[in-house]
Image: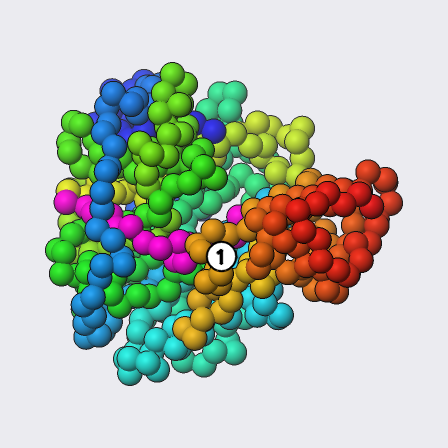
Amino acid sequence: MSVLGCTAEEEATTNPLFEEKWPEYEAKMKKAGLNEAAINAFKSNFAVLTSGKDLNIPESAISSVSSLPKYDNLKAEDASLLQATVMLKLNGGLGTGMGLDKAKSLLPLKGKETFLDFIAQQVLYMRKKFECDLAFTLMNSFATSGDTISYLKKYKGLAAGSLPLEFVQNKAPKVTKADLTPAAWPKDKGHEWCPPGHGDLYPALLGSGMLTKLQADGFKYMFVSNSDNLGATMDLKLLTWFAQSGAPFAMEVAARTDADKKGGHLARSKKTGGLLLRESAQCPDADEKAFQNVTRHKFFNTNNLWINIEALQANFDKYGGALPLPVISNEKTVDPRDKKSTAVLQLETAMGAAIECFGGAQAILIPRSRFAPVKTTADMLALMSDAYEITDDFRMVLKAERNGVPPNVKLDGSYKFVDDMMGLVKDGPPSLINCTKLTVEGKMTFDKKVVFEGEVKVVNETGSTKRLKSGTYKDTTVTL
């Protein structure tokens, strides 16, 4: 994976390789019925890919962010702002890395309750508590839309007023790695397209008409978060702070620990003085040590964002309809399940990177309770355990006994996919409330009442599946 950076529109007209390749992409996207905003966004990304520029962010170009406003210091709450605010959940992920072919948000976490159940209940709770019709919508993908809308039918009135319950993110052509032509796969034409990352939020809002709809209905603020992060619900203190700050854009960040050192961090541009995100792929090898220094670069992006809708429209006008976000080039095969199929590049953007597109953008330090994402089956197992609890407002948060530190769960490759992990805990998840680190190696299942405390490693070196008996295992290695 590499991050290629952003480019000005005029660069495309002075880029011979772009000029040669672009017409075929433009024709393909128009034939597929993609809107102008989607085409402009991919055009900008493809111009970056073909520019050949190295747009890494060296340590010498940035300064660290030493301090930020803290959520714990917020006091003011203005409930009247809820009427002018929309809560938006990104729900385009299929969870293919976890072996899924449906929306990740349909996975059960506590009993039969799924991510979508918790999200719907969060919205309904807020409406009841504050006696307001809190607006809610989802950005689905072409792969998650049908299942999601069907599942949410049981929550009557979840769509508020005239606002649609969903809009659908765009799709982008895959790029043949060898010659940069549009990828072709006659066996399954669907494999020629990919989701363009959650940075597609912005062109999807524009191209779907949702941005125009929100402005026409009088909405001023938007809170955006991932559907797999159940800690990120609408928060009145944060909304009030954002509105009173006058900032066009704000990012919730959390404190980096050693467990987060390889992930991106917040920084400040020496050139502009503004905030930016630096991902690991944007860091030159010589600066890797500084990148991973969590005392120097203290904060990471949680993907919980606050956006001033008028400011977003102004930025679209400023940049000609496509925000200049850094471009991430992911190497894949055209058929994800066929590793011998054509090598392709998938061009993606990240929505948090827009922080550098908004002059005066801010960041705020939040408690880890607002960040509980599920990216792997290990994350899912931790959330299923008693280390997490459900709050009155239907957030999934670490219990107080954990002191803000989640259990460190390591599952070997036998449990990469959800079905395999669910087999491990088919009699119920283990107790992790007092567990610091759990490592599981080899095929096994846990009995109904398994308790892990401290650091525990469970190993099965045989080829057959073994059973770990009920009991308490503390600071030990268990060989089955």
* Residue 187 visible to an observer of this rendering: no
**Mark 1, secondary structure of its residue:** helix
**Front residue of this view, candidates 372 and 196:** 372
Q: Nearer the viewer, residue 6 or 334?
A: 6
Whether residue 332 is visible, yes or no, is yes
Using the image as rendered, state which of residue 476 and residue 265 is in the foreground. Answer: 476
Residue 204 position in % (x across, y down) = 34, 52
| Magenta span | 360-376
Left or right of 126, for residue 315: left
**Which quarter of the picture shows residue 468?**
bottom right
Q: Residue at x 66, y 31 (%)?
A: 339
Using a 10 Å C-alpha cutoff, classify the residue at mark 1 as few (fewer than 14 neighbours), some (14 to 19) or many (20 or more). some
372 is within the stretch colored magenta:
yes
Q: Of the residues shown, which amino acid type is indicated by label 1?
A: Arg
Q: Is residue 108 magenta?
A: no
- For the view shown, which residue lies furthest in the front direction? 475
Q: Is residue 143 above or below residue 324?
A: below
Q: Could you tell me which residue is drawn at 84 percent across and 48 percent down? A: 465
Q: Is residue 258 left or right of residue 58?
A: right
Residue 44 location, x and y as percent?
31, 34
Q: Is residue 136 above or below residue 368?
A: below
User: Which residue: 47% across, 51% down?
Assistant: 405
Image location (x, y in percent) of residue 364: 25, 51
Q: Would you name the residue on which mark 1 appears?
A: 402
Q: How many marks?
A: 1
